[in-house]
Image (tube, rainbow, N blue to C red):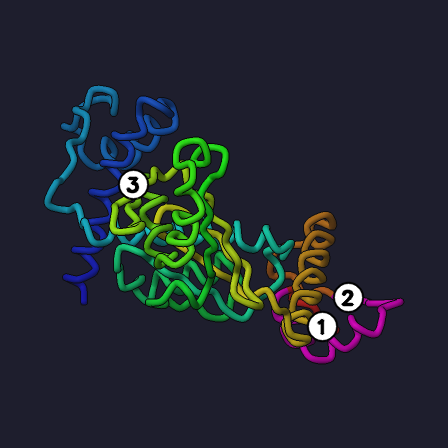
Amino acid sequence: HDADKQTAYGTLYYVLVRLIQVLAPFTPFVTEVMYQNLVRAVQPAARESVHHCDWPLPDEAAIDPTLLEQMALARRVASLGLAARSSANLKVRQPLARALVFVADGQKGLSPELTAIVADELNVKSLRFVSDESQLVSYHLLPDAKLLGPKLGKQFPKVRQALAAAPAAEIVRRIRAELPVELAVDGETVTLQASEILVESRPAEGLAVAAEKGLTVAVDAVVSVELEQEGLVRDLVRYVQTLRRDADYAMDDRIAVGLFGLDEAMQQALERYQDYLQQETLCTH
């Protein structure tokens, strides 16, 4: 155990020193103080200043492409999930039942650790990846009459019919990638540009959806009574914590909270989530 601790401390020391060297040009005075305390105090022969040190070179072997890819996906899912919430006027403090994610390029999903982080960011009880985008949204495709009417002439109605019969999800993926779309019309191939097709998206019932570049995220827009009550208590927790801060209480101080003039909805919410309120605010009653 002592050897493990020594290894851990050595790794932490190495990381801190490298971090100081990286930050030195941007925060010269703070990093200089840290360098003197961490390095010069224990290594008198070290360079006199952090600003005399060489700029750290990246360790290419330490780069984890899979982790970078996962983190990029996690950030996109969180961003689109928040956009979906906003489109349905669902404030972030309101807990939701689930979020569903479709990735067009076939990525299987996120690691359990990143899934938990994104679910917490979106304030949903569960986050799940699906293999069929039609579970989240349906698309209605129309040729742009202003652009294609003069171009196609009498052929325009048949192109519209062919576009309506085509696999919408696949065509939408090509449109997002700004790729041309080919349709078979009377034995001929008609090529449409992505900008010549109008896409109407219709979220599945009960969902709010946001999509971008092959990624579609949906959140459950139906708020149950239990989730609504949890959201009310979370708002109350935030209000009590604000009062605690304004009163300059320490974070571990026990406080007494008096609640007066509550409506029936809040009373019912507190009956269910009283333990949560007391735990989060350290209040006695």
Q: In terms of secondary structure, where does tag 2 sit?
A: loop
Residue named by callout 2: 257
The residue sitting at 68% across, 50% down in the picture is: 245
Residue named by callout 1: 284
Residue 110 appears left or right of 93? left
For this rendering, which residue is in front, 64 or 11? Answer: 64
Q: Are marks 2 and 3 in contact (CB under 8 Å)?
A: no
Q: Position of residue 101 (x, y in %)?
A: 40, 62
Question: In which quadrant is the C terminus drawn?
Answer: bottom right
Q: State how far apart marks 1 and 3 are (Cα).
A: 70 Å
Residue named by callout 3: 191
Q: State how far apart marks 2 and 3 are (Cα).
A: 68 Å
| Region of the chain picked out in magenta, as a range | 256-280
Question: In which quadrant is the N terminus drawn?
Answer: bottom left
Give yes or no for residue 230 being in the magenta stretch: no
Report the amino acid beneath label 1. Thr
Give yes or no for residue 276 being in the magenta stretch: yes
Q: State how far apart marks 2 and 1 are (Cα).
A: 7 Å
